[in-house]
Image (cartoon, grey):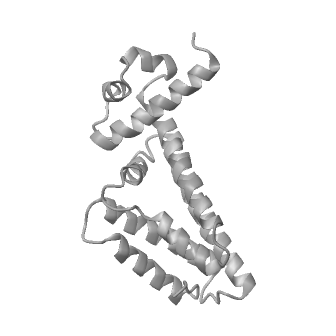
Amino acid sequence: MARPSTQKQRRIEVVDAALAAAAAHGLRNLSLTDVANQAGVTRGALLYYYDDLDAILVEAHAAGMARVGTERAAIVARHDTPADKLAAAISAGLPSGPDDALMRLLYEFDVLAGKSPLHDELVQRLYQEQLDLYTGILTEGVASGDFALTGPLADTAMNLVALEDAYGLHIVAGGSITVADAHRAIALYAAQAGARLPE
């Protein structure tokens, strides 16, 4: 049996392989063999660490969320004013472009919601993280007098999350909406809602 430190490292490698394989094949077509091939191991070796493909995907989903959430929070925290924090949150919440594999995968994981209680929980957790981030920034902006919201703070935060998710999905789908288009449209909504971004 592998030692705990080795086991932990192997599980991280399997999760990384699952994320890469899912990005290459798509979640709907992903198989345990795809993950094994990406990891350079046998299917049996994967099943030593995980019960099945879904168990791997749940951990991969959580890992993807953590990367996006942690990195985004750190980016926002580097700014001082609510307006700068809001601008940073909007930029960091959107995919970098149609080829943003991790963001595309997180959107694909949303499809699994309703089919697995664990995926449901992760999807809801990511939504709550998004909502909490925007709520915190808006609350700080109102308290400092930088923002004069035209509607309820909770609704404004919820709308920012909805716009971020909707535009992000169009971006990774390779549609006509660009990252610049999405950022401009969300910034316009924020300004109309009384949370103006820096000029």
- Judged left or right of residue 4, residue 178 is left
Query: In this view of the protein, can residue 112 be seen by the observer?
Result: yes
Percent x, y of residue 124: 55, 53
| Residue name at image x 31 percent, y 55 percent | 99
| Residue name at image x 24 percent, y 71 percent | 176
Query: In this view of the protein, can residue 155 be seen by the observer?
Result: no
Q: Is residue 95 above or below residue 14?
A: below
- Judged left or right of residue 84, residue 181 is left
- The number of callouts visible is 0
Q: Is residue 61 above or below residue 169?
A: above
Please tell me which residue lies in front, 42 or 47: 42
User: In the orientation shown, which residue stands out farthest toward the right?
Assistant: 143
| Quadrant occupied by the N terminus | top right
- Judged left or right of residue 55, residue 141 is right
| Residue name at image x 59 percent, y 90 percent | 150
User: In the orientation shown, which residue stands out farthest toward the top?
Assistant: 1
Q: Is residue 24 above or below residue 197?
A: above
Residue 186 found in image quarter: bottom left
Percent x, y of residue 47: 45, 18
- Judged left or right of residue 20, residue 192 is right
| Residue name at image x 48 percent, y 38 percent | 60
Please tell me which residue lies in front, 187 or 107: 187
Percent x, y of residue 126: 55, 54
Percent x, y of residue 78: 64, 66
